[in-house]
Image (tube, rainbow, N blue to C red):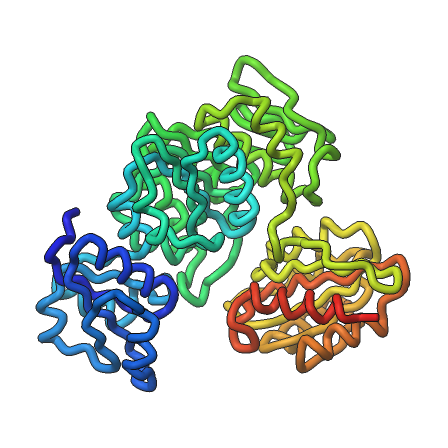
């Protein structure tokens, strides 16, 4: 879609919104930057824009303004069923998000990864493998690099590897990856999507425009994805940590293998990798299936998998203090992700839990403790909810804390030599921290300051 000379309103003055304004300036659109927060100062927004131009509107959005807009671009934090967005839809205005906006200008191939958990690790690994084969590879999305900031570097022979959330998929229309993957679908963001059915359907949009010439990689052990495979428009390739698949990558004992349906090849032993836990074996299987679909040589895939290190904030080893190993899994922002981290622990563990309430239930989280979690330290909005669930299920060894400083102090005083401390909160960071990265950085800084 040609946007030169079009009147485009961008909603949100955060990183995503400012990135959208930058792209729209480059293509010659007439930009309005809107934020409903009446407390914002125009001067602060102007400072964010730097050399970019946009008409800044704060507070009320009039019907007259809506009537002038050709396209609405919303940030991921803006729900598509919000009153503002519904007003634009009722006026017949097309609604895009950052992913759709950037894809409109991508000249190369796209590889897209979504799912409830494992996105960041899998995206980083897929990006590393493809970049080792093709220098013109750009890793974008929630992983740190803005798609709108990288898209003008793309070319016919480039590859964009994108980590994409359900919030971003809500606003895709023509987005068409050559290879996509849905890693898993477990309860998350139900305060936004309301039902699991809606959440699953949103994740499935990653393959909406794919055809049989494209590949969609799916987790054979996920019931939602087993159902989706029957109606997926792309050619389905599977991965599994529990059994052999018809076509795809799978774990067989300590070995990861790949089969094309005829030939079955051993790729590597899981102990040759630097990643911990079955969930990471699944991430590696997904990455192998995706990069095989992109035509990357086996030897290169194997080499890069062996060299790959865990991404920051995902079961990241921090330090050993007084014989106690500290791990930062701040990206464990929902119960299923945190369960994976607990399962990866091999020592008696003190678990740090709690944060912003996204509407999750914590029964499975508590049940995953087994004989691994010895003590739980609770922090944030969900503290009491998690404690009540734990008590109901017979786990009563927990302590409440009011700050991350207090949390680390409690852990240091209670942990014994030969044990581990794991920050894997099963909740978002909002309310106490700007994001999960800040939560993890503060935790690491406090741990490193321990005697």
Q: Is 181 placed above or below 99 here?
A: above
Q: Is 261 placed above or below 362 here?
A: above
Q: Residue at x 30, y 84 (%)?
A: 38
Residue 285 location, quadrant:
top right
Q: Which residue lies furthest to the right in this view?
A: 417
Q: Is 125 placed above or below 251 here?
A: below
Q: Which residue lies furthest to the front in this view?
A: 51
The reply to whether residue 197 is in sight is yes
Q: Which of 253 and 180 is in front in this view?
A: 180
Q: Is 403 placed above or below 2 here?
A: below
Q: Give residue 81's position: percent from left, percent from top.
A: 29, 66
Q: Residue furthest bottom?
A: 39
The reply to whether residue 396 is in sight is no
Q: Give residue 27's position: percent from left, percent from top.
A: 19, 53
Q: Give residue 304's position: percent from left, percent from top.
A: 60, 33
Q: Residue at x 27, y 52 (%)?
A: 101
- Disc count in the image? 0
Question: Is residue 93 left or right of 382 when viewed as pictured?
Answer: left
Q: Quadrant of the C terminus?
A: bottom right
Q: Which residue is drawn at 60% across and 59% down?
A: 332
Q: Nearer the viewer, residue 368 or 177?
A: 177
Q: Give residue 283's position: percent from left, percent from top.
A: 58, 40
Question: Is residue 266 left or right of 239 when viewed as pictured?
Answer: right
Q: Which residue is drawn at 68% across and 43% down?
A: 275
């Amino acid at each position: 879609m040609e946007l030169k000379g079009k009147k485009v309103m961008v909603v949100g003055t955060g990183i995503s919104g400012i990135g959208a304004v930058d792209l729209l300036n480059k293509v010659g659109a007439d930009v309005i930057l809107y934020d409903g927060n009446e407390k914002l100062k125009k001067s602060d927004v102007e400072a964010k824009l730097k050399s970019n131009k946009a008409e800044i509107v704060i507070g009320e959005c009039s019907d007259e303004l809506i009537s002038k807009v050709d396209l609405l671009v919303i940030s991921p934090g803006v729900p598509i069923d919000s009153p503002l967005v519904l007003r634009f839809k009722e006026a017949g205005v097309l609604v895009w998000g950052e992913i759709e906006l950037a894809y409109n200008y991508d000249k190369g191939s796209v590889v897209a990864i979504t799912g409830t958990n494992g996105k960041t690790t899998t995206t980083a690994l897929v990006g590393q493998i493809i970049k080792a084969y093709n220098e013109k590879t750009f890793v974008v999305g929630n992983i740190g690099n803005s798609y709108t900031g990288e898209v003008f570097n793309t070319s016919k022979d480039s590859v964009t590897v994108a980590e994409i959330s359900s919030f971003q998929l809500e606003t895709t229309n023509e987005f068409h990856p050559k290879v996509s993957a849905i890693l898993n679908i477990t309860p998350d963001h139900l305060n936004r999507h309301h039902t699991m059915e809606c959440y699953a359907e949103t994740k499935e949009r990653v393959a909406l425009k794919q055809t049989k010439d494209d590949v969609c990689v799916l987790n054979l052990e996920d019931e939602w994805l087993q159902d989706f495979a029957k109606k997926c428009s792309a050619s389905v390739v599977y991965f599994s940590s529990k059994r052999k698949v018809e076509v795809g990558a799978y774990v067989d004992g300590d070995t990861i293998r790949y089969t094309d349906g005829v030939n079955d090849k051993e790729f590597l032993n899981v102990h040759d990798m630097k990643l911990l836990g079955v969930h990471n074996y699944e991430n590696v299987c997904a990455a192998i299936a995706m990069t095989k679909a992109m035509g990357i040589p086996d030897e290169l895939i194997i080499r890069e998998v062996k060299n790959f290190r865990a991404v920051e904030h995902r079961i990241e080893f921090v330090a050993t203090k007084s014989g106690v190993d500290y791990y930062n899994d701040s990206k464990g922002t929902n119960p299923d992700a945190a369960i994976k981290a607990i399962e990866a622990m091999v020592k008696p563990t003190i678990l740090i839990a709690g944060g912003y309430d996204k509407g999750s239930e914590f029964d499975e989280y508590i049940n995953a403790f087994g004989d691994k979690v010895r003590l739980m330290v609770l922090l944030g909005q969900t503290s009491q909810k998690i404690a009540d669930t734990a008590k109901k299920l017979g786990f009563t060894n927990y302590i409440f804390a009011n700050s991350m400083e207090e949390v680390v102090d409690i852990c240091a005083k209670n942990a014994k030599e030969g044990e581990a401390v794991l920050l894997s909160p099963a909740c978002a960071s909002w309310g106490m921290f700007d994001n999960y990265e800040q939560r993890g950085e503060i935790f690491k800084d406090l741990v490193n300051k321990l005697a």
